[in-house]
Amino acid sequence: MRINARLEGESERKFREILEMTHRTQTDAIKEAIAAYHRDLTRGKTDHAAKTLEACGFVGSGAGNPNLSRDYKKLLGRHIRRKT
């Protein structure tokens, strides 16, 4: 496939910088950019959503009782009794 594209302003500056930094031809730089963009798009929406939530501080992780979802009522009751 043959592609003809016009780059101006910031896009042109960035593309020239990429070519200078990588010593790639325009064709090779475009092919690598397409490959990277494709990887990003096909990585999996679940993975992308989780990373976005983590970056926002919405999702965290920690250590705790591995059976907490099963035993939470018993553990909560025990904790409340200790406080009184």
Image: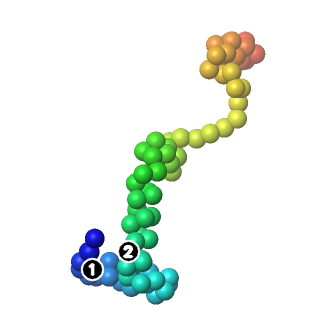
Label 2, residues with CA under 10 Å away: few <14, some 14-19, many ≥20: some
Q: Which residue is mark 2?
A: 30
Report x, y in % for residue 59.
53, 41
Could you tell me the amino acid type at mark 1? Leu
Q: Are marks 1 and 2 in contact (CB under 8 Å)?
A: no
> Seen in the image, is 68 located left or right of residue 47?
right
Nearest to the eye among marks 1 and 2: give it: 2
- Residue 2 quadrant: bottom left
Q: Residue at x 42, y 45 (%)?
A: 45
Residue 49 appears in the figure: no
Mark 1 → mark 2, Cα distance in angstroms: 12 Å
Report x, y in % for residue 46.
46, 42
Report x, y in % for residue 47.
49, 45
Q: Where the C terminus falls, by quadrant?
A: top right
Label 1, residues with CA under 10 Å away: few <14, some 14-19, many ≥20: few
Task: Look at the numbered disc 2 and give the secondary structure of its residue.
Answer: helix
Q: Residue at x 70, y 26 (%)?
A: 66
Disc number for residue 40: none
Q: Nearer the viewer, residue 23 or 7?
A: 23
Query: Compared to 52, does 13 lie above or below?
Result: below
Report x, y in % for residue 28.
42, 78
Could you tell me the amino acid type at mark 2? Ile
Q: Earlier in the sequence, mark 1 or mark 2?
A: 1
- Residue 7 quadrant: bottom left
Q: Nearer the viewer, residue 84 or 79?
A: 79
- Residue 33 quadrant: bottom left
Q: Residue at x 70, y 16 (%)?
A: 75
Q: Nearer the viewer, residue 83 or 51?
A: 51
Q: Residue at x 66, y 22 (%)?
A: 68
Disc number for residue 7: 1
Residue 50 appears in the figure: yes
> Seen in the image, is 5 located left or right of residue 72?
left
